[in-house]
Amino acid sequence: MVDTVLVTTDCVCDLTTDLQERYQIPIMYYYVQTEEARFQDTREMNSDDLIEYIEKDGKKAYSSCAPVEEYKDFFAKQKKNTDAPIIHICMAQYVSDAYKTAKEAAQGDDSIHVVDSGHLSGGMALMVLEAAKMAKRGAPCEVILKELESMKEKVSTSFIVDSVQCLYRNGRISKNIARLCDALSLHPILKLSHSHMKPVGLCVGSRKRFARAYLRWALRRGGEIVPDMAFLITAGASYEFRQFLLEEIKQRMPCKTIVINKASATISCNCGSGAFGILFLRK
């Protein structure tokens, strides 16, 4: 069966390469601007490169979506390969300029539908995958768009941050809040709601201690969680710590598939090394 819709998205959805290829999802890049040069996220710089640059070298880096002309080129390239309508799924519109930029690039073309996912990273990926699966089953464009709108309220996207320095450096929190968090070893929990990213709690203590506290909070009301798939996204985490997180999650959440992936350089640029999140769907 030929897909009724071509689903595309941005690299900040943190899909694994395997899932991108399995569902044939074209990916648009972001940029990471360092003190020396600009790099395409995932293509020219990954999160490990970015974290080493920030943490070890003590330098600054900032992320941004591609400009309008590059989104236009991206859409034009996709249209050469398909006559189907395109659904392009973006990061939450109040967290990034990508939604506004992609909308401008698609202006005047009724075959391109730009969607504000309301989420980022693995939360965004859950919506991308659902849209791609529906397209493969032959669902029409308007049905997929309606389902995506409904999913926004069901996706749970949250992260906990080890250090607040990247949040402070990128203007996400004030200097006084950053100082307070550092002085008291506070680790903010950030959650996406209505396309905004908001602090919703604080955890304290060592890394494993605050990780357990975050997971208890994130996975409360376990009976409401859809057990099909969840994403565990980490920035700068060792293999051993990822395995620790996986075991803690399994104790709290029965799930058929837990996709483990590293955050994109863009996400890592804003959350810093040691951040991680569990992202899933509620009923």
Image (cartoon, rainbow, N blue to C red):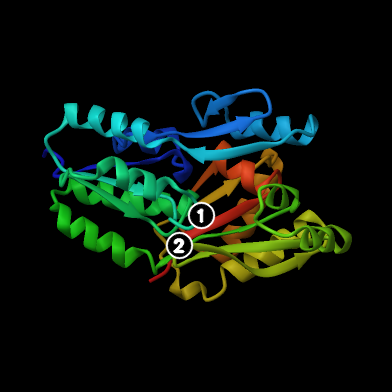
Q: Which disc, if any, is residue 195?
A: 2
* Amino acid at circle 1: Val
Element on which disc 1 rests = loop
Q: In terms of depth relative to the viewer, which is nearer, 190 or 282?
A: 190
Q: Which disc, if any, is residue 42?
A: none
x and y percentages locating residue 169 in the rendered image: 71, 47
Q: Quadrant of the N terminus?
A: top left
Tag 1 and tag 2, C-beta contact below 8 Å? yes
Q: Mark 2 Cα within 10 Å, few/some/many (few <14, many 20+)?
A: some
x and y percentages locating residue 4 in the rendered image: 13, 44
Left or right: 13 as drawn, with respect to 32: left
Please name the residue that numbered disc 1 is placed on. 95
Q: Is residue 263 visible?
A: no
Which of the 4 quarters of the picture holds residue 219?
Answer: bottom right
Which sits earlier in the primary sequence, circle 1 or circle 2? 1
Q: Is the residue 217 above or below the residue 126 in the image?
A: below
Q: Mark 1 Cα within 10 Å, few/some/many (few <14, many 20+)?
A: some
Q: In terms of depth relative to the viewer, which is nearer, 104 or 262?
A: 104
